[in-house]
Amino acid sequence: MAGPICFYVPSHIIDHIARNARRAGLDADAAQRTAVASAAIRQQRQTLATTSMDALTTPRPGQGDRQIFDDQQRFETGGKLVRGEDDGPAAPANVNAAYDSLGATREFFREVLGRDSIDNAGMTLLGDVNYGDKYDNAFWDGTRMVFGNGDEQIFQDFTRDVDVCAHELTHGITQHTAGLIYTDQPGAMNEAFSDIFAACVDQFVQKVDAGEHNWLIGEEVMAAPMYGEAIRSMAHPGTAYDNPVLGKDPQAGHMSQYVPDGDPHINSGIINRAFYLSAIDLGSYPAAKIFYAALQSLWPHALFTDCAYLCAEQARLLARDGKVSRNAPQTIRAAFREVGVA
Ligand SMILES: [Zn+2]
């Protein structure tokens, strides 16, 4: 089941880097290659070679088993199979980081939300590392999770931050549930759900709750010269970065800043912040249960107001069943009103 290809670093950032890196004294070649490669991936979905799997564990169907491939710096997915489920660590280290990230994402969905892999039927999880040459991005192509190495000036290896994998895999889950289309308000919600569960997986791994988390997306993949920047801030949309190479974070955090037909990564800040406000009050996992229930009852062309209504409705049902606190419906309504969705 193929959906749209979702890139981790949005095109407005990649394009800004490609235009401004050289002026800022950085080597712009990697960023320009990334921009070109991303466009090519968008145009032609690559046919996947089935590689032989000598001496590695064969995935059991329907168990959410993992398979990690090394693309060996080629711009082609499905390279050499290097680690299967329950196989020991393999070289290089990013193979194991990808294996662990896929595992953490799978476990969060299983333990906290009761979901069995992307399709809720134990779909095998495929991950590719070392994709391309200093490739400054990561993406979910509808069938597999693909990580670039970064150029080490702007981005580092994309396996470094578990929220990369969690964000991208959630696009697969959205594709199998609400099927939100990738434009305007449904597109912004599609993006927001990916950030929401990415933040929750981050907290799941770090064993922290809403109040102790930084609510940043992608801060661990920024290379040393970009230390302290991030790709998005869920607590304070529009403040994640501001520098000559990346540009200035354009994310909206309130309906008054909504960009009609804007990039989904820009308007997603509104729903991200509504989740953040809910999680601070209810705890991240109860808030995640509510938003996950809403995701399953949303539909492809749903609007923000539908999301607000369904979150409050699901909060009421979950509160009735003792799964979230009694005040959850009111907290959810207040959070959406605070970002101008009512
Ligand atoms: Zn995304």
Image (cartoon, helix red, strand yellow):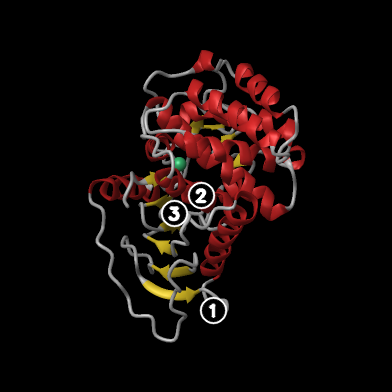
Say left or right for 312 vs 327. Answer: left
Asked whether mark 1 and ligand 1 are closer than 8 Å, the reply comes as: no
Farthest-out residue, top: 256
| Ligand 1 sits in quadrant | top left
Tell me which label, 1 or 2, sits earlier in the chain.
Answer: 1
Q: Residue beneath label 2, please? A: 155
Specify few, some or many for label 1: CA neighbours under 10 Å numbering under 14, 14-19, or 20 or more.
some
- Residue drawn at the location 63% of the way across and 28% of the way down: 236
Q: How far is disc 1 from disc 3 in space, using C-alphas? A: 24 Å
Q: Could one spot residue 214 in this view of the protein?
A: no
- Residue drawn at the location 50% of the way across and 30% of the way down: 268
SS for tag 2?
loop
Q: How far is disc 2 from disc 3 in space, using C-alphas? A: 30 Å
- Residue drawn at the location 42% of the way across and 57% of the way down: 146
Question: Percent from the top left, x then y, of residue 180?
Answer: 40, 35
SS for tag 3?
loop
Where on the picture, by quarter, is residue 104? Answer: bottom right
SS for tag 1?
loop
Q: Which mark is residue 119?
A: 3
Marks 1, 3: nearer the viewer: 3
Q: Residue beneath label 1, please? A: 87
Tell me which label, 1 or 3, sits earlier in the chain.
Answer: 1
